Image (cartoon, helix red, strand yellow):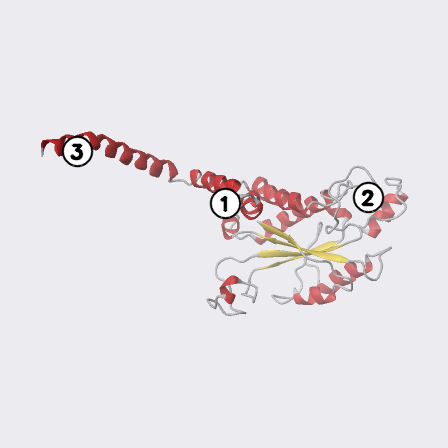
Amino acid sequence: MIAKITNGGKGSCIGLVQYLQKEGEGNWFTHDKGNIDASQVTSSIDANRKHLGQQDDKYYQVILSPSQSELNHVGNDLGKLQAYTRGAMNEYAAQFGKGIESRDLVWFAKIEQARTFSHTDKAVQQQQRVEGESKEGSQTHVHIIVSRTEDLSRYQQKKQAGEIDRKHPLKLSPATNHRAASQGAVQGGFDRTEFKQAVEAQFDRQFGYDRPLTESFQYANRLQKGNQEERIALRLEALRQQPNYLLSHSSTQQSKQAEQEQIPQRKKEDLSL
Protein backbone atom coordinates (compact mmCIF):
# COMPACT_ATOMS: atom_id res chain seq x y z
CA MET A 1 0.00 0.00 0.00
CA ILE A 2 1.43 3.34 -1.03
CA ALA A 3 -0.07 6.36 0.75
CA LYS A 4 0.93 9.73 -0.63
CA ILE A 5 0.00 13.27 0.41
CA THR A 6 0.60 15.90 -2.26
CA ASN A 7 1.35 19.59 -1.83
CA GLY A 8 -1.63 21.70 -0.80
CA GLY A 9 -3.77 23.85 -3.07
CA LYS A 10 -4.01 27.58 -2.33
CA GLY A 11 -7.14 28.40 -4.36
CA SER A 12 -10.28 26.63 -5.46
CA CYS A 13 -10.18 22.86 -5.82
CA ILE A 14 -12.26 23.00 -9.03
CA GLY A 15 -9.30 22.22 -11.29
CA LEU A 16 -8.39 19.07 -9.37
CA VAL A 17 -12.03 17.95 -9.17
CA GLN A 18 -12.47 18.37 -12.93
CA TYR A 19 -9.24 16.46 -13.59
CA LEU A 20 -10.45 13.56 -11.44
CA GLN A 21 -13.61 13.33 -13.54
CA LYS A 22 -11.55 11.88 -16.41
CA GLU A 23 -12.81 8.32 -15.87
CA GLY A 24 -16.42 9.35 -15.44
CA GLU A 25 -18.78 11.86 -13.87
CA GLY A 26 -19.83 11.74 -10.23
CA ASN A 27 -19.37 8.69 -7.98
CA TRP A 28 -17.59 10.66 -5.26
CA PHE A 29 -18.06 9.50 -1.68
CA THR A 30 -17.29 10.65 1.86
CA HIS A 31 -17.52 9.29 5.40
CA ASP A 32 -21.29 8.79 5.44
CA LYS A 33 -22.59 8.77 1.86
CA GLY A 34 -21.79 8.12 -1.79
CA ASN A 35 -22.90 9.01 -5.33
CA ILE A 36 -21.90 12.64 -4.80
CA ASP A 37 -21.51 14.87 -7.86
CA ALA A 38 -18.50 17.03 -8.62
CA SER A 39 -20.26 20.35 -8.04
CA GLN A 40 -21.02 19.41 -4.43
CA VAL A 41 -17.40 18.37 -3.89
CA THR A 42 -16.10 21.70 -5.17
CA SER A 43 -18.59 23.87 -3.30
CA SER A 44 -18.14 21.99 -0.01
CA ILE A 45 -14.34 22.13 -0.02
CA ASP A 46 -14.16 25.74 -1.22
CA ALA A 47 -16.71 26.95 1.36
CA ASN A 48 -15.01 25.22 4.28
CA ARG A 49 -12.26 27.73 5.00
CA LYS A 50 -11.87 30.17 7.84
CA HIS A 51 -8.98 32.21 9.24
CA LEU A 52 -6.81 31.18 6.25
CA GLY A 53 -4.63 33.68 4.40
CA GLN A 54 -4.39 34.01 0.65
CA GLN A 55 -1.14 32.07 0.56
CA ASP A 56 -2.26 29.36 3.00
CA ASP A 57 -3.06 25.87 1.73
CA LYS A 58 -6.82 25.38 1.52
CA TYR A 59 -6.92 21.65 0.82
CA TYR A 60 -4.70 18.59 0.35
CA GLN A 61 -4.85 15.48 -1.76
CA VAL A 62 -4.29 12.00 -0.31
CA ILE A 63 -3.68 9.12 -2.73
CA LEU A 64 -4.05 5.49 -1.65
CA SER A 65 -2.51 3.01 -4.10
CA PRO A 66 -2.93 -0.69 -3.25
CA SER A 67 -0.49 -3.14 -4.82
CA GLN A 68 -1.78 -5.66 -7.37
CA SER A 69 -1.38 -8.35 -4.71
CA GLU A 70 -3.59 -6.35 -2.32
CA LEU A 71 -6.16 -5.70 -5.05
CA ASN A 72 -6.26 -9.41 -5.89
CA HIS A 73 -6.75 -10.20 -2.20
CA VAL A 74 -9.93 -8.09 -2.05
CA GLY A 75 -11.04 -9.10 -5.55
CA ASN A 76 -10.62 -5.52 -6.75
CA ASP A 77 -13.94 -4.88 -4.97
CA LEU A 78 -14.78 -1.17 -5.10
CA GLY A 79 -17.14 -1.43 -2.12
CA LYS A 80 -14.35 -2.86 0.02
CA LEU A 81 -12.01 -0.11 -1.13
CA GLN A 82 -14.59 2.51 -0.18
CA ALA A 83 -14.84 1.01 3.31
CA TYR A 84 -11.05 0.93 3.52
CA THR A 85 -10.81 4.59 2.47
CA ARG A 86 -13.21 5.62 5.23
CA GLY A 87 -11.02 3.83 7.75
CA ALA A 88 -7.89 5.42 6.28
CA MET A 89 -9.38 8.89 6.76
CA ASN A 90 -9.99 8.06 10.41
CA GLU A 91 -6.26 7.31 10.61
CA TYR A 92 -5.56 10.63 8.86
CA ALA A 93 -7.65 12.52 11.44
CA ALA A 94 -6.09 10.63 14.35
CA GLN A 95 -2.55 11.60 13.28
CA PHE A 96 -3.16 15.24 14.23
CA GLY A 97 -3.53 14.29 17.89
CA LYS A 98 -6.54 16.55 18.33
CA GLY A 99 -9.12 13.94 19.30
CA ILE A 100 -10.97 14.22 15.99
CA GLU A 101 -12.36 11.65 13.58
CA SER A 102 -13.03 11.38 9.86
CA ARG A 103 -16.50 12.89 10.33
CA ASP A 104 -14.89 16.04 11.79
CA LEU A 105 -13.25 16.68 8.41
CA VAL A 106 -14.58 17.72 5.02
CA TRP A 107 -13.29 15.22 2.51
CA PHE A 108 -14.39 13.50 -0.69
CA ALA A 109 -12.87 10.51 -2.47
CA LYS A 110 -13.03 9.05 -5.96
CA ILE A 111 -11.80 5.64 -7.11
CA GLU A 112 -9.92 5.34 -10.40
CA GLN A 113 -9.12 2.08 -12.16
CA ALA A 114 -6.56 3.02 -14.79
CA ARG A 115 -3.12 4.56 -14.92
CA THR A 116 -0.87 5.66 -17.76
CA PHE A 117 2.90 6.04 -17.99
CA SER A 118 4.20 9.58 -17.44
CA HIS A 119 7.52 11.28 -18.14
CA THR A 120 8.59 10.59 -14.54
CA ASP A 121 8.36 6.80 -14.96
CA LYS A 122 11.71 5.04 -15.33
CA ALA A 123 10.35 2.92 -18.20
CA VAL A 124 9.56 6.08 -20.19
CA GLN A 125 12.94 7.63 -19.43
CA GLN A 126 14.65 4.45 -20.65
CA GLN A 127 12.43 4.48 -23.77
CA GLN A 128 10.87 1.13 -22.85
CA ARG A 129 7.40 2.69 -22.68
CA VAL A 130 5.67 5.64 -24.30
CA GLU A 131 4.20 8.48 -22.24
CA GLY A 132 0.41 8.13 -22.12
CA GLU A 133 0.47 4.35 -22.63
CA SER A 134 -1.82 2.41 -20.28
CA LYS A 135 -0.22 0.40 -17.50
CA GLU A 136 -0.97 -3.33 -17.35
CA GLY A 137 -2.76 -5.21 -14.60
CA SER A 138 -5.04 -3.91 -11.85
CA GLN A 139 -4.35 -0.22 -11.30
CA THR A 140 -7.22 0.71 -8.97
CA HIS A 141 -6.38 3.57 -6.59
CA VAL A 142 -8.14 6.25 -4.57
CA HIS A 143 -7.89 10.05 -4.74
CA ILE A 144 -9.06 12.01 -1.69
CA ILE A 145 -9.48 15.78 -1.44
CA VAL A 146 -9.57 16.99 2.16
CA SER A 147 -10.10 20.52 3.47
CA ARG A 148 -7.41 22.01 5.67
CA THR A 149 -10.04 23.43 8.05
CA GLU A 150 -12.11 21.08 10.18
CA ASP A 151 -15.80 20.77 9.24
CA LEU A 152 -17.14 24.21 10.14
CA SER A 153 -20.76 23.03 10.42
CA ARG A 154 -19.84 20.26 12.83
CA TYR A 155 -17.54 22.61 14.74
CA GLN A 156 -20.44 25.03 15.32
CA GLN A 157 -22.78 22.21 16.36
CA LYS A 158 -20.29 20.84 18.88
CA LYS A 159 -19.54 24.30 20.23
CA GLN A 160 -23.24 25.11 20.73
CA ALA A 161 -23.74 21.76 22.45
CA GLY A 162 -20.90 22.55 24.84
CA GLU A 163 -18.80 19.61 23.61
CA ILE A 164 -15.83 21.87 22.82
CA ASP A 165 -14.69 25.28 24.05
CA ARG A 166 -12.20 26.15 21.32
CA LYS A 167 -12.52 29.73 20.11
CA HIS A 168 -11.52 28.91 16.54
CA PRO A 169 -11.86 25.85 14.29
CA LEU A 170 -8.81 23.69 13.78
CA LYS A 171 -6.42 24.27 10.88
CA LEU A 172 -5.05 20.86 9.98
CA SER A 173 -1.94 20.63 7.86
CA PRO A 174 -0.23 17.28 7.12
CA ALA A 175 2.71 19.37 5.93
CA THR A 176 3.48 20.68 9.43
CA ASN A 177 7.00 20.27 10.77
CA HIS A 178 5.67 19.44 14.23
CA ARG A 179 5.64 15.74 15.09
CA ALA A 180 3.16 14.84 17.83
CA ALA A 181 4.42 17.58 20.16
CA SER A 182 2.81 17.55 23.62
CA GLN A 183 4.37 20.80 24.82
CA GLY A 184 4.95 24.25 23.38
CA ALA A 185 2.83 26.68 21.39
CA VAL A 186 1.84 24.09 18.79
CA GLN A 187 0.67 20.73 20.12
CA GLY A 188 -0.20 17.69 18.05
CA GLY A 189 1.25 17.47 14.56
CA PHE A 190 1.24 15.01 11.71
CA ASP A 191 3.78 12.26 11.14
CA ARG A 192 3.59 11.04 7.55
CA THR A 193 5.65 7.95 8.32
CA GLU A 194 3.24 6.90 11.05
CA PHE A 195 0.29 7.60 8.75
CA LYS A 196 1.71 5.36 6.02
CA GLN A 197 2.34 2.55 8.50
CA ALA A 198 -1.13 3.00 10.03
CA VAL A 199 -3.05 2.69 6.75
CA GLU A 200 -0.96 -0.33 5.78
CA ALA A 201 -1.72 -2.03 9.10
CA GLN A 202 -5.38 -1.11 8.74
CA PHE A 203 -5.60 -2.92 5.38
CA ASP A 204 -4.04 -6.03 6.91
CA ARG A 205 -6.48 -6.05 9.85
CA GLN A 206 -9.54 -5.16 7.83
CA PHE A 207 -9.03 -7.80 5.15
CA GLY A 208 -6.88 -10.42 6.91
CA TYR A 209 -3.96 -9.80 4.58
CA ASP A 210 -0.72 -11.63 5.43
CA ARG A 211 1.74 -9.02 4.24
CA PRO A 212 5.17 -10.21 3.06
CA LEU A 213 8.08 -8.21 4.43
CA THR A 214 9.00 -7.04 0.92
CA GLU A 215 5.57 -5.38 0.55
CA SER A 216 5.83 -3.40 3.77
CA PHE A 217 6.53 0.29 4.15
CA GLN A 218 9.21 -0.59 6.70
CA TYR A 219 11.09 -2.63 4.09
CA ALA A 220 10.97 0.08 1.41
CA ASN A 221 11.84 2.83 3.88
CA ARG A 222 14.86 1.04 5.33
CA LEU A 223 16.18 0.07 1.91
CA GLN A 224 16.05 3.73 0.97
CA LYS A 225 17.24 5.35 4.20
CA GLY A 226 19.06 2.64 6.16
CA ASN A 227 22.81 2.10 6.23
CA GLN A 228 24.50 -0.72 4.33
CA GLU A 229 24.45 -3.10 7.30
CA GLU A 230 20.71 -2.53 7.82
CA ARG A 231 19.95 -3.05 4.14
CA ILE A 232 21.88 -6.32 4.01
CA ALA A 233 20.18 -7.62 7.16
CA LEU A 234 16.77 -6.68 5.77
CA ARG A 235 17.39 -8.45 2.47
CA LEU A 236 18.54 -11.58 4.30
CA GLU A 237 15.40 -11.51 6.45
CA ALA A 238 13.26 -11.16 3.33
CA LEU A 239 15.09 -14.12 1.78
CA ARG A 240 14.44 -16.26 4.86
CA GLN A 241 10.72 -15.52 4.55
CA GLN A 242 10.54 -16.91 1.02
CA PRO A 243 8.37 -20.09 0.89
CA ASN A 244 11.12 -22.19 -0.69
CA TYR A 245 13.95 -20.83 1.44
CA LEU A 246 14.09 -23.74 3.92
CA LEU A 247 13.99 -26.33 1.13
CA SER A 248 16.66 -24.53 -0.86
CA HIS A 249 18.79 -23.90 2.22
CA SER A 250 18.52 -27.58 3.28
CA SER A 251 19.46 -28.74 -0.21
CA THR A 252 22.52 -26.47 -0.24
CA GLN A 253 23.64 -27.73 3.17
CA GLN A 254 23.22 -31.35 2.07
CA SER A 255 25.30 -30.67 -1.03
CA LYS A 256 28.06 -29.09 1.05
CA GLN A 257 28.00 -32.02 3.49
CA ALA A 258 28.20 -34.57 0.65
CA GLU A 259 31.09 -32.63 -0.88
CA GLN A 260 32.96 -32.64 2.44
CA GLU A 261 32.40 -36.40 2.87
CA GLN A 262 33.92 -37.05 -0.56
CA ILE A 263 37.13 -35.13 0.20
CA PRO A 264 38.81 -37.89 2.34
CA GLN A 265 37.96 -40.50 -0.29
CA ARG A 266 39.50 -38.35 -3.02
CA LYS A 267 42.66 -37.92 -0.95
CA LYS A 268 42.97 -41.73 -0.54
CA GLU A 269 42.54 -42.19 -4.29
CA ASP A 270 45.22 -39.54 -4.96
CA LEU A 271 47.66 -41.31 -2.63
CA SER A 272 47.12 -44.68 -4.30
CA LEU A 273 48.13 -43.35 -7.73
Is residue 211 in sight in this rendering? Answer: no
Q: Quadrant of residue 160?
A: top right
Q: 22 or 255, which lies in front? A: 255
> If you read the primary sequence from the N terminus, does the residue marked by circle 1 or circle 3 appear first?
1
The correct choice, above or below, for 70 with respect to 229 in the image is below
C-alpha distance separating marks 1 and 3 = 44 Å
Question: In the image, which disc is placed on residue 214?
Answer: 1
Under mark 2, the amino acid is Val
Is 75 positioned to the left or the right of 243 in the image? right
C-alpha distance separating marks 2 and 3 = 76 Å
Is 231 positioned to the left or the right of 161 in the image? left
The reply to whether dot 2 and dot 1 touch (C-beta < 8 Å) is: no
Under mark 1, the amino acid is Thr
- Point out residue 126 in the picture as x, y percentages from the top left corner: 48, 66
- Point out residue 125 in the picture as x, y percentages from the top left corner: 51, 66
Q: Crowding near pointer 1: few (<14 within 10 Å), some, many (20+)?
A: some
Which secondary structure, mark 2? loop
Is residue 169 in sight in this rendering? Answer: yes
Question: In the image, which disc is placed on residue 266?
Answer: 3
C-alpha distance separating marks 2 and 1 = 37 Å
Under mark 3, the amino acid is Arg
Q: Quadrant of residue 197?
A: top right
Question: In the image, which disc is placed on residue 186?
Answer: 2
Write the residue at 24% across / 33% down: 258
Which secondary structure, mark 1? helix
Camera-near label (2 vs 3) is 3
Question: In the image, which disc is placed on residue 89?
Answer: none
Write the residue at 77% across / 54% down: 148
- Point out residue 156 in the picture as x, y percentages from the top left corner: 87, 48
> If you read the primary sequence from the N terminus, does the residue marked by circle 2 or circle 3 appear first?
2
- Point out residue 130 in the picture as x, y percentages from the top left corner: 50, 70
> If you read the primary sequence from the N terminus, does the residue marked by circle 2 or circle 1 appear first?
2
